[in-house]
Image (cartoon, rainbow, N blue to C red):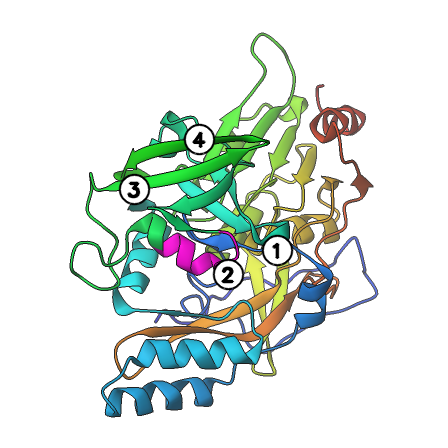
Amino acid sequence: MPGPSAYDRPRRMRRGAALTLIFASLLVTGAATGTWGHRAERAVEPRTADHRAAAGRTADRAAVEAAAAQAVESGTSGSQAAAEVVSRSGDRWSAIYTAGEFEDYQQQLDGAYVGVGLWVRQAAGGWIEVSRVQPGGPAALAGIAAGDRLCAVDGRASRGRPVTEVVARLRGDGKDGRPGHAARIGTRVELDLRRGTRQRHATLHRARLTARNVTADRPAGTDGPTRIKIAAFGKDTGVEVRRAVRAVAPRTGLLLDLRGNTGGLVTEAVASAAAFLDGGLVATYDVRGRERALYAERGGNTRIPLVVLVDGGTMSAGELLAGALQDRGRAIVVGTPTFGKGSVQMPSELADGSVAELTVGHYRTPSGRVVDGLGIIPDLTVEDGAEKRARTVLSGLGGGA
C-alpha cells in the first residue's frame, strides 16, 4: 500500500476562514482507493430521510470477520455470513464482495469492464431505475435511457429486490462457472423495462466496455464557456481533467458538470480539485476516530471563472470535489442539493478470500461541513434550467455565455 502523500497545507481559506484545520497525519493514498464510489452496473440509493437517520451506522469489523471465519470453519459461505452481519448493522454503505467480484470492481475502476453499460439505483416504490447509460454500449444501442424502470432481468422480477442482487444479474455473476466473476463477452441478458406506461423487452449481449469519465464540449460557433463533464472518478480522471482545463480559453470560463456523478476513486477527485486550486486543503476525514486530510498539489488554474453544476445524483467523491471548490471560494455551485454520501469505506480480506468494504468514518469539507446524510447545498438552487442559469452566472463572473 502506498505511503502518505505529503501535500502543502493551505495558507488560508476564503470561506469559513475562522476555522483552522491542522492535522498531524496526511492521507494514506492506497487506503481509500476504490472505496468511495460506485461501479458500473452497481446501484446507488436516493438521499432520503431514512438515509439521514441512518448516517453514522457502521458495521463492526470484528463481528464481520468473526462471522466469516466461523462460516468457513463450518464449511459454509464466509461472504454470505459476513453480508448478513452487515445487513443487520443498518450500515447501508458497507458491502461484501467475493474475491472475483472485488477483482472485477478494481478492473472497472481502471476503466474497463464486461457488461451492458447500465448504472441503476433504487427508486420510490421499490422500483429499480436506470440512472445512467453508457454511450455506445449495448443498453444505449437498444434505446434504453436514464429514468427507465428495470422490471425484470432474465425473467426474474427486480422490483422489491436488493439492488446488489439486480446488479449481479445484469453482470451475469457466476454464469460462466466461476463464482463471483461476470459472464463472458457476448453472453445474453434479457431485460423487461417500463417507460411511463409503456412496457418493452430487450435482448442485450454483454461487451467489453471502456468507461469514458471525462468529456469536454463547447457550443459550436460561439465564444461560450467550455463544459467539462465528469461522470465518475476512475483511473486517470484527474489527468484528463487537467488536460481539459489547459485547453480552455481563460476568458470564456468553465462549467464543471458533476450532475449524476456516481463517485469513484477519492484520490482522483483530489487530483481533479488540483486542476482548479493552487494547493491547499480539499477535505478532512476520520478513520476510527483519527483525523486525516486530503490536499491538492500546487499549480492549478485559479484564474478561470468557474461554475459547478450539481444535482441529487451527485455523490460521494463528486460531493467532495464540489464541496472543496465551494468552501475554498473557487467556484459558484448551481443546481439542487446533492445526494449526501460522505462516509468512508476501506477494504479488508476475509477468511475465505472475500473482501469486506466497511465504513470506518466520514469526511468533511474544508470548512468542516458534514456531507453524509446532508449533501452539498448549492449557492444557487435551481431545479429546472440549471445549466442555462449556470451560464448566466458564469457570464457575471467574467466568462463568456
Query: Would you call the spot at circle 3 few (<14 residues within 10 Å), some (14-19), or many (20 or more)?
Result: many
- Asked whether disc 2 touches disc 4, contact meaning CB atoms under 8 Å apart, the reply is no
Q: Earlier in the sequence, mark 2 or mark 3?
A: 2
- The disc placed on residue 36 is 2
The local secondary structure at tag 4 comes to strand
Which stretch did the figure color magenta? 159-168
Tell which residue pokes out farthest to the left in this image. 177
Query: Would you call the spot at circle 4 few (<14 residues within 10 Å), some (14-19), or many (20 or more)?
Result: few
Residue 215 coordinates in the image, percent (x, y)? 48, 31
Residue 170 coordinates in the image, percent (x, y)? 35, 48
The type of residue carrying mark 2 is Trp
* Residue drawn at x 76%, y 69% as measured from the top left: 20
Q: Quadrant of residue 191?
A: top left
The type of residue carrying mark 4 is Arg
Which mark is nearer the camera, 2 or 4? 4
> Residues under labels 3 and 4: Cα distance?
14 Å
Residue 119 coordinates in the image, percent (x, y)? 46, 45
The type of residue carrying mark 1 is Leu
- The disc placed on residue 320 is 1
Q: Earlier in the sequence, mark 1 or mark 3?
A: 3
Q: Is residue 207 above or below residue 340?
A: above
Query: Would you call the spot at circle 2 few (<14 residues within 10 Å), some (14-19), or many (20 or more)?
Result: many
> Residues under labels 2 and 4: Cα distance?
34 Å
Q: Earlier in the sequence, mark 3 or mark 4?
A: 3
* Residue drawn at x 73%, y 66% as measured from the top left: 368
Q: Quadrant of the N terminus?
A: bottom left
> Residues under labels 1 and 3: Cα distance?
35 Å
* Residue drawn at x 61%, y 36% as measured from the top left: 256
The local secondary structure at tag 1 comes to helix
- Asked whether disc 1 touches disc 2, contact meaning CB atoms under 8 Å apart, the reply is yes
Q: Earlier in the sequence, mark 2 or mark 4?
A: 2
